[in-house]
Amino acid sequence: MKHRIFMNYPTLHPKLVHLSESQVSELINRYYSGERISHLIEQFGINCSPGNFHTYLPAEISIEPCPNCGSLQETPRLPRKSYKRKLVATLYCSQCNHRNVFNCKCLFCRNKLKTNQRITPQIKPSSTQHFNYPSDQYSIKTGDLTLEQAVSLLALFHCSGYKNINNEMSLYLTKLEAGHFAPTSDYGYELVDRLIAAELLSIYTPSNNILRTLAGFNFNATIKCKLSGDSLGFLLQDIERVTMQEDWPQSWYTQIEELAFDIAFAECMEFFDCCAKERKFPDVDNKSKSIMIRNLLEDFSPGECCRAIHSGAQYASDYLVKNSTSPQSAANYMLTACQRWINKARIENWKLKPFQRNVNCPRSMMSYVYFDTFLKIGEAGFITPVALIDKRSKKINGK
């Protein structure tokens, strides 16, 4: 069948060319409304597997032109689970392969990078008059950062919206929650807050009043983060160079376990809250929950801790039904059940099978950047006890 081009869908997969434009629109709407994929495949006569159905749907066309060739950019269709979590796909130009990310490798961005590298870093851009950065901000190097700062900066720009206009970098925190920057919003607040305290970021409200803290705000607030475009670009590129060449500052090696623990702790806190929410349990004392999870992580991997938490949640559900008790009592019982389960595992020396990541607790960008980009051990960071992360990363990387 001859390939047809529609106004709203200029690029159509061969498996969909037998459909009219209105049928394609109906198919997209019904898919994202939650209708069973097998029914859609049968009704619309599409020869494909349900597992990757979204990849056959035509991309959305953006009104934002490509900065390189001027063509219309597009965003690929996301799986509907990602769509429901309001994740945002990356803009992409099919004509010149430009992607709307800070580390794009298209010819246009590579030439732009070469041009920027010829600019003397010590020359402050004119936009500095809008900021209250210290005088050495523009000469900051990767070695000046802590490991946490380097990871969180890179993760921040991987999952947030940003624009570079007249050398002013505007970072839109409204997209952080959708991009799943950190396992929990509290941990995400802390990371951004510490970057502000280190004067690496400055948060602006619409009235341009600088906020020194994110306390009382959430990532859906209308706030912007502005940095110098040139200095930020140099810094992010250097962080990536250091990770690719494994040329870490010596101080980072002593910080490996601490950052791994912080991420693992946040992931376990997130999973505990997820299990409790699924069973409609009310909140428990945060301090008690924190102590319990820290105790679990002393000897077990995040995946093994999640198995203990899941078992504790199941025991609490049984306790609720069998004893006709209150949801609050069941929630408190879940805490003690998790601790008893892990204590028994310690005493009897159980060989625990790590729990798989829950679909409702997707992997955060902090985890991806730290364990994949920096340590290069991937999901081993989820199934390895925190105390062994340092040794494992050095073994794999040949350190």
Image (cartoon, rainbow, N blue to C red):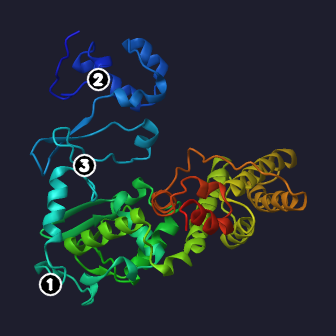
The kind of residue on which mark 1 rests is Gln
- The kind of secondary structure element at disc 2 is loop
Image quadrant assignment for residue 181: bottom left
- Give 208 or 256, whichever is nearer the viewer: 256
* Residue shown at 56% from the left, 50% from the top: 361
Q: Which residue in the structure is indicated by mark 3?
A: 99
What's the residue at 42%, 36% (across, down)?
79
Q: Which mark is residue 13?
A: 2
Residue 278: x, y in percent?
A: 64, 47
* Residue that badge 1 annotates: 129
Could you tell me how many numbered marks the image carries?
3
Q: Is residue 390 visible?
A: yes
Q: Are marks 2 and 1 in contact (CB under 8 Å)?
A: no
Task: Give coordinates of residue 269: x percent, y percent.
Answer: 62, 62
Element class at badge 3: loop
Q: Amino acid at mark 3?
A: Arg
